[in-house]
Every structure is written in C-alpha cells, then in structure tokens.
Amino acid sequence: MRTYWPRISAIALTLVTLFTVGCGGGSTQKRLPVYPVKGTLTLDSKPLGNVELQLQSLSSQPDSLKPPAYGTVGADGTFVLSTYGKGDGAPEGDYEVALTADAMNPVGLPSFAPFQVSIKKDTGIIAIDLKSTKTRRQGAGMPLVE
C-alpha cells in the first residue's frame, strides 16, 4: 500500500505558507503629502558628495510620526529628496540632518555641528551647509574624518 503523507504534507505546508504571506494586510500608517525638494549639501562651503543624506523628523508628538526623507548626494553635492518613492519629496516639517556612507562610494563621514532644516509646501530648493567640528559622530560603521 502506497503512502501519500509526504505529498499531502508538502501541499499543506505550501498552502499554509501562501495563506500566511497573503494575509499580511497593508500598512495602516497614512501617507503624508510630500513636496518636491532638491538641493545642495556642502561642508564648510565645499560640496560634500558620495554620502547618503537623511532628514529625521524633530516632531516629538507620537501621533505625528513622520517617515524620514532621504537622498543620495552626488559628487557635486546635489541631491533630490525621497520619502515613499524615488524623488517624490518630503512631508512638511522640521528635520535634523544625518549622514551615512553611500554604499556605492564608501567614504569617511565628517564630524559636523547639528543642522536643522524646515520643509514647507513651497520650499523647492534647499542649501545645507554643514560646519565641521571636532566632536565625533557615529556613522554607519565607517571611519570618521576629523
């Protein structure tokens, strides 16, 4: 007599996996309106490129959690911000600037004084000019430049 249990088990496991993956639902977080923003990143008035720029919301109210806006900074210091999709922009609000190493062009991250930017509906273009400091800042496991 042939046993079908191995086949039945495999089919059941496949169905359970498909059902579980298919029941993930969607994100319950509401997408905030975003506004196109591009700009330049400089350090002591010189273009700072080949880094990843991230704007982290300064809002401390739990009901207004904003996703970070981010952008890859080119060698010439230019960037375009994204939040939900490539180049879509950033939500209105106040943000602190953070940097991480660009995975394609890893470089040492500079030490810089905290810098904040404000994004509004009509911002469009921003200039971020960071100022060097001797204070060491953590940055994605890459060596820091002083």
Image: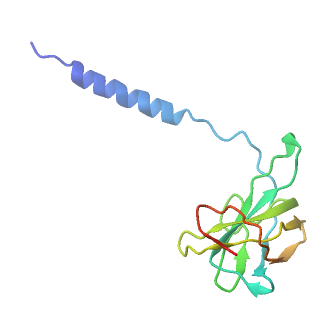
Q: Quadrant of residue 37?
A: bottom right
| Residue 64 in the figure: left or right of residue 18 | right
Q: Quadrant of residue 81?
A: bottom right
Residue at 23 percent across and 25 percent down: it is: 7
Q: Position of residue 16 (x, y in %)?
A: 42, 27
Total count of labels = 0
Residue at 60 percent across and 69 percent down: it is: 143
In the displayed image of the protein, which residue is found farthest to the left? 1
Check the picture and name the quadrant holding the C terminus: bottom right
In the displayed image of the protein, which residue is found farthest to the top? 1
Q: Nearer the viewer, residue 6 or 104?
A: 104
| Residue 144 in the figure: left or right of residue 129 | left
Q: Position of residue 115 (x, y in %)?
A: 85, 68
Q: Is 18 rendered above or below residue 69?
A: above
Check the picture and name the quadrant holding the N terminus: top left
Q: Quadrant of residue 102?
A: bottom right
Q: Nearer the viewer, residue 135 or 96?
A: 135
| Residue 7 in the figure: left or right of residue 35 | left
In this picture the colour scheme is rainbow
Q: Is 20 rendered above or below residue 35?
A: above
Q: Position of residue 59 (x, y in %)?
A: 88, 51
Q: Nearer the viewer, residue 67 or 52?
A: 52
Residue at 29 percent across and 22 percent down: it is: 9
Q: Position of residue 49 (x, y in %)?
A: 66, 80
